[in-house]
Amino acid sequence: MQLDEQQLVQLKSDITELARASVHPHYRHLQDADVHTKTSATDLVTVVDQDIEQQLTDRLRAQYPHATVIGEEAVSQNPQLIEYLDESELTFVIDPIDGTWNFAHGVSVFGVMVAVLSEGRCQHALLYDPIMDDWQQATLGQGAFYEDSRAQQRPIHVSDRGGIAQLRGFVPLYNFNQAMQLHLAPQLAGFARIMEFGCSCFEYRLLNEGAVDFIIAPDPKIWDHAPGQLILSEAGGYSCFSDGEAYHPGRHRGILLAANNLETWQVLMDHFRLV
């Protein structure tokens, strides 16, 4: 099941409205009481995350009474929400503020991520920058696009770079366990650039438009990766788990390697010895 054009426009309008109402007044004006920790001192949630997720969830449930709505903050309280992903005809996956640590510390590298799934397969994806008011978006089988604040669109494509010396990528060492950190760190020399943003939304945006060439991610959460993965695929990229299994939104264990093409994926698999 796919949404029609009018429904997609309404979804984007809702996201924009809620972000303007909640993000803009709080950005760089959060109080201590507005920020809380979840699993660690660096795993944060703010009143803005909670407000956007709750309001968007309420709107989607009113518009689509039979749909399943999966929000990052809701799942942190009730992990069973994602168990029936493959059985739902229509599922909305929401990351209300991806890059919460950045947002909470006044760094403008954060975004809103939304995926629309049908029976476990991603149909639509939206990556929204509430500061610049622009998007990356895709519908399955229809290509990937950038849209600016005036609703002007252009197609986007991954890079064609190859070879370790030319490659740029995201390797979030702190997300891996200590053994993998020690395994990966010595192998980062020789690349053109290695980065880490703490924000899947912007990491995928750079990969999907060809500014970087790969992302390595351990234990990918659905809200962090489902939207970016669809846009990557529609932009011509390639993604697979290190054990060879194709990406599926319901899988959240293992090492996911997303790249500009299959050849780069294989070069990186060999270089990092991920098998």
Image: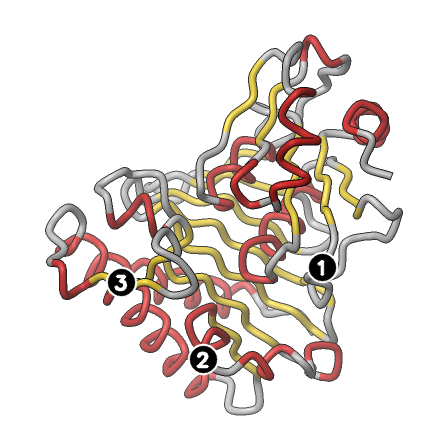
**As displayed, is residue 48 above or below residue 157?**
below
Identify the mark nearer the N-term, 1 or 3: 3
Circle 3 SS class = strand
Residue 46 image label: 3
Q: Amino acid at mark 1?
A: Arg
Residue 82 percent location from the top left of the image: 62, 77
Q: Amino acid at mark 3?
A: Thr
- The residue beneath circle 1 is 253
Residue at 50% in and 44% down: 136
**As displayed, is residue 169 above or below residue 38?**
above
- How crowded pointer 1 is (Cα within 10 Å; few <14, some 14-19, many 20+) is rated as few
Q: Which of the image's four quarters has the N terminus?
A: bottom right
Occupied quadrant, residue 238: top right
Left or right of 55 in this view: 210 = right
- How crowded pointer 3 is (Cα within 10 Å; few <14, some 14-19, many 20+) is rated as many
Residue 94 image label: none
Rounded to the nearest whole Å, what is the CA distance between mark 1 and mark 3?
26 Å
Rounded to the nearest whole Å, what is the CA distance between mark 3 and mark 2?
15 Å
Q: Nearer the viewer, residue 149 or 128?
A: 128
Residue at 35% in and 39% down: 109
Residue at 34% in and 77% down: 54
Residue 211 percent location from the top left of the image: 55, 23
Q: Is there CB contact under 8 Å for labels 1 and 2?
A: no
Circle 1 SS class = loop
Q: How many marks?
A: 3
Q: Is there CB contact under 8 Å for labels 1 and 3?
A: no
Q: Nearer the viewer, residue 16 or 172?
A: 172
Residue 77 image label: 2
Identify the mark nearer the N-term, 1 or 2: 2
Q: Which mark is nearer the camera, 1 or 3?
A: 1
Rounded to the nearest whole Å, what is the CA distance between mark 1 and mark 2?
19 Å
